[in-house]
C-alpha cells in the first residue's frame, strides 16, 4: 500500500508540474500587445520635448518680443502642428488627451493669426509692386496704397499684442510636463497589436472624411480652407508619427496610379511633407507609396495658394474700406475662386490617390 501511495503521489506530481510551470509562465509573461509600447510612447514624447524647450513653465521668461521677431515662431508652429496631429489621432482612444490638445491648439491658432497679419502686409507690398510695374501709379493711387499698408501695419501690431498676451498667460509650458507623464502612463502596454489597427483605422476615416464629406466651396474659411485643413492632417500626421508609416519609392512604372509619376521633380514632390524624415522606423511599420503622397501634397499646396491669395485680397479691400472685420475667418469667395478650388478637388478625386492610400493602409498588419 505504501508503494502504491508513493506511485500515486509521483504520478500526480508529474501531471501537475507542467500545469504549475505553465501557470508560472503565464503570470510572468508579458501580454502580446506590450511589444513595441516603448516606441508608441516615444513617438509622442519626441514631439513634446522640443516644445518644452521653448515654452518653459514660467512662460517665455520675458523673451516674447525676441521670439516673435525670430524665425523660431514659424518652426515652433510646425512643431505644434506635429504634436497637435498626434493628440488628435489618439484622443478617440485616450480621452484624457483632449484638455492638452486644447492647450496646444490655442497657441498654434494664436501663432497662425499673427502669421496671417504679417503675411497680409507682405502680400499687399508684393501686389502693389507688381501693379505699379505693370501700370505706373499716379500720386492718388500711391497715397491709397500707402493708406492700405498703414492700415494693415496697424492690424499687424494689434495681432502682435494679442499674441504677446496669449503667450504670457498661456499655461502650455506648465502643461507639457504633465502631458509627458500622462503619455508615459496611458501608452504603457500600448503595442503593435493595438496601435497599428487603431492608427490605420483613424487614417482611413480621415481620408474617407475628405472624400465623402460635404464642403461648400462657395465659402472660403468654412468650405475651401476646411477641406484643405482636413486633407493636410494626413501628411502632417505621417510626418509626426516619425516612422510608424514609412514612405516607399516605387520603381518606375510601379506607382499604383502610374499617371502620378508625372509629378516627380515637381514642387509638390520636393515639399517637406512628401519627404518626411521618419528618423525612427518602427519595428512593424506601414508602408505607403510616395507618388500617392505627391498628389495629396499638391492639392494642399494649390488650395493653400488660392486661400492666401483670396485672404490677401480681402485684407487689402478691408483696409481700403476701414473694415475691422476679421478677414482671416471670412467666408467670402468669388465665383472664380470657387471654380478654381472645385477643379483642384476634382483633380484629387479623379486621381484616386485617396482610395489607393486607404487600400495600402488597410494591408498593414501588426
Image: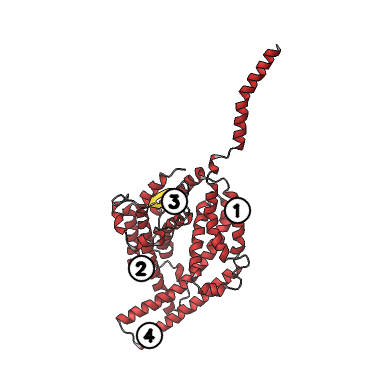
Counting from the top left corner in percent of width and height, residue 240 is at 48, 56
Question: Closer to the observer: label 3 or label 1?
Answer: 3
Residue located beneath label 1 in the image: 182
User: Dot 2: few (<14), some (14–19), or many (≥20) neighbours within 10 Å?
Assistant: few
Real-space Cα distance between discs 4 and 1?
57 Å
Question: Quarter-wise, where is residue 4 in the image?
Answer: top right
Counting the numbered discs, the total is: 4
Question: Quarter-wise, where is residue 322 in the image?
Answer: bottom left
Q: Answer yes or no: is residue 159 visible.
A: no
Residue located beneath label 4 in the image: 142
Counting from the top left corner in percent of width and height, residue 204 is at 43, 49
Q: Is residue 34 above or below residue 180?
A: above
Cβ atoms under marks 3 and 4 closer than 8 Å: no
Residue located beneath label 2 in the image: 334
13 left or right, relative to 270: right
Question: Closer to the observer: label 3 or label 2?
Answer: 3
Residue located beneath label 3 in the image: 245
Tag 1 secondary structure: helix
Real-space Cα distance between discs 3 and 1?
24 Å
Amino acid at each position: 500500500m505504501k508503494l502504491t501511495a508513493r506511485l500515486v503521489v509521483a504520478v500526480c506530481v508529474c501531471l501537475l508540474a507542467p500545469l504549475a510551470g505553465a501557470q508560472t509562465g503565464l503570470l510572468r509573461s508579458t501580454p502580446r500587445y506590450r511589444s513595441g509600447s516603448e516606441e508608441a510612447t516615444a513617438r509622442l514624447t519626441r514631439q513634446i520635448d522640443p516644445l518644452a524647450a521653448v515654452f518653459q513653465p514660467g512662460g517665455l521668461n520675458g523673451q516674447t518680443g525676441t521670439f516673435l521677431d525670430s524665425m523660431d515662431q514659424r518652426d515652433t508652429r510646425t512643431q505644434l502642428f506635429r504634436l497637435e496631429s498626434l493628440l488628435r489621432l489618439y484622443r478617440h482612444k485616450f480621452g484624457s488627451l483632449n484638455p492638452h490638445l486644447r492647450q496646444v491648439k490655442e497657441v498654434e491658432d494664436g501663432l497662425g493669426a499673427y502669421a496671417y497679419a504679417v503675411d497680409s502686409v507682405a502680400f499687399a507690398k508684393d501686389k502693389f509692386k507688381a501693379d505699379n510695374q505693370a501700370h505706373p501709379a499716379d500720386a492718388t493711387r500711391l497715397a491709397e496704397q500707402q493708406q492700405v499698408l498703414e492700415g494693415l501695419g496697424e492690424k499687424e501690431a494689434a495681432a502682435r499684442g494679442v499674441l504677446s498676451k496669449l503667450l504670457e498667460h498661456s499655461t502650455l509650458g506648465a502643461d507639457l510636463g504633465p502631458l509627458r507623464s500622462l503619455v508615459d502612463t496611458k501608452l504603457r502596454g500600448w503595442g503593435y497589436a493595438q496601435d497599428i489597427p487603431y492608427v490605420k483605422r483613424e487614417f482611413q476615416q480621415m481620408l474617407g472624411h475628405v472624400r465623402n464629406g460635404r464642403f461648400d466651396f462657395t465659402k472660403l474659411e468654412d468650405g475651401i480652407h476646411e477641406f484643405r485643413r482636413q486633407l493636410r492632417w494626413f501628411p502632417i500626421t505621417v510626418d509626426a508619427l516619425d516612422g510608424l508609416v514609412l514612405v516607399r519609392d516605387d520603381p518606375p512604372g510601379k506607382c499604383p496610379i502610374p499617371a502620378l509619376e508625372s509629378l516627380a521633380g515637381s514642387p509638390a514632390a520636393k515639399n517637406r511633407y512628401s519627404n518626411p524624415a521618419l528618423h525612427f522606423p518602427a519595428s512593424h511599420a506601414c508602408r505607403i507609396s510616395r507618388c500617392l503622397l505627391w498628389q495629396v501634397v499638391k492639392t494642399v499646396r494649390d488650395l493653400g495658394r488660392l486661400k492666401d491669395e483670396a485672404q490677401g485680397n480681402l485684407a487689402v479691400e478691408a483696409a481700403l474700406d476701414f473694415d475691422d472685420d476679421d478677414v482671416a475667418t471670412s467666408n467670402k469667395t468669388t465665383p472664380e475662386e470657387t471654380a478654381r478650388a472645385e477643379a483642384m478637388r476634382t483633380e484629387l478625386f479623379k486621381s484616386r490617390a485617396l482610395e489607393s492610400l486607404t487600400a495600402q493602409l488597410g494591408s498593414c498588419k501588426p
